[in-house]
Amino acid sequence: MTQRPTAAPDPAPASSGGPSGPAAPSVGPPRRISGAVWAALGIVYVVWGSTYLGIRIAVETLPPFLSAGMRFSAAGLILLAVIAAREGVGALKVSRRQLGSAVLVGVLLLVGGNGLVVLAETGIPSGLAALLIAVVPAWVVVFKALTGERPGVRGLAGVLLGLAGLAVLMLPGISGEVRTSGVVLVVVGTLMWSVGSFSSSRLPMPGNPFTASAYEMIAGGVGGFGVALARGEQHGFDVSAVSGRSWTALGYLVVFGSLIAFTAYAWLLHTAPISLVATYAYVNPVVAVALGSLVLDEALTWPIVLGGAIVVAGVWLIVSTERRT
C-alpha cells in the first residue's frame, strides 16, 4: 500500500471525506473534464498501481521495515518543508489532539497496513499483494455496518463479492504455491489499513490534508524504524550490499509514490468529479498485476486471475454505490 491522503483512503473516496481532508465536491451541472484532470488521474492510476512493483524490488536487498521507515520519513519531511515554503510555518501548527490523531492514523496505515505488506512482499508476488489489498473497501463497509451504517443491496453484494474473491486469492497460499504467511500478513495489513481509514474520518485530524498526511508519514516512518530495530533488521545490514536497483525503487516510492501521486490525488479531490476519482480503487490492482507480470515475470495463475476479477467487480459495486449517496 502506498500513502494516500486520508480524506479518501483506500476505499471509495466518496464515503470518507473526513476532517483530515477536503470534502467531496458538491453536485452541480456536468462539467468538462480537462486534460490536466486526465493527466493527474493517469498519474494516480499508473504510479499507485506501480508502487507494489516498487516495493517488491526494494525489498530484494533492503530490509522491509527499514525501507518503509526510510521511505515515509523522507517523504514526510519533504512534504513538511514544501508546506512551510508554500504556505508558511503556520500551516504546520496543529493541536495536541490533532497531532495525536495523525500519529495514530499514520501508525495504523503505514506501520500496520503498509509495513505488513512490505514484509509480505519478500515472499509473495506484487500482483497478488495488490489484489489482496483491493478488498479494503469491503472491510470498511463492514466496519460501517458494525457502527450502524447499514449498506444497501449493491454495497452488500460488493462486500460479499470482495470476500469471495479474497477466498479465491488465498488459494495459492493454501496450496503451497506461495508463502501462506505472506498471504496472511497482507490480509492482516488490509484490516489495519481499513481501521486506520475508518478512524481517520472520526478523529480530530489537522484541517490541512497535506499537513495531516505529512505528520502521518513521519509517524509511519518512525514507527517503521522502531519495528525494524525490534526485529533486528539492523544486524548484518550492509549498505554496500544494497543493489542500485533497490535504491532506485526506494527513491521512486518516495518521490513518485508518496509525493507526486499524493499531490495529484489531493488536487483531484478538489477538481474532478468524485465518481471519476474513485475509479482508482479498481484500476490500481489491474495495473499492479500487469506490471508484476511484465517486469518481474510473475505467474498469472487461475486463482489470481479469477480471484482478482471477483475482487475488482466487488470494489466496482461498492464504489458505484458510495458515489451515488
Image (cartoon, helix red, strand yellow):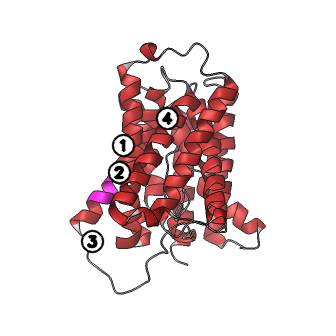
* Tag 3 residue: 33
Location of residue 91 by image quarter:
bottom left
| Circle 1 SS class | helix
Q: In this view, does 223 lie to the left or right of 256?
A: right
Does the magenta run of residues contain 194?
A: no
Q: Of marks 4 and 1, which one's residue comes earlier in the chain?
A: 4
Q: Is the magenta stretch mostly helix, strand or loop?
A: helix
Q: Of marks 3 and 1, which one's residue comes earlier in the chain?
A: 3
Distance (Cα) linking label 3 and label 4: 37 Å
* Tag 2 residue: 260
Where residue 14 appears, as percent x and y from the top left, is 52, 70
Where residue 118 appears, as percent x and y from the top left, is 56, 34
| Circle 3 SS class | loop
Disc 2 residue type (three-letter): Ile
Distance (Cα) linking label 3 and label 1: 27 Å
* Tag 1 residue: 255
Q: Of marks 2 and 3, which one's residue comes earlier in the chain?
A: 3
Distance (Cα) linking label 2 and label 4: 17 Å
Closest to the observer, 165 or 140: 140
Q: Of marks 1 and 2, which one's residue comes earlier in the chain?
A: 1
* Tag 4 residue: 70
Closest to the observer, 275 or 158: 275
Q: Which of marks 4 and 1 is in front?
A: 4
Magenta range is 39-44
Disc 4 residue type (three-letter): Met
Distance (Cα) linking label 4 and label 1: 12 Å
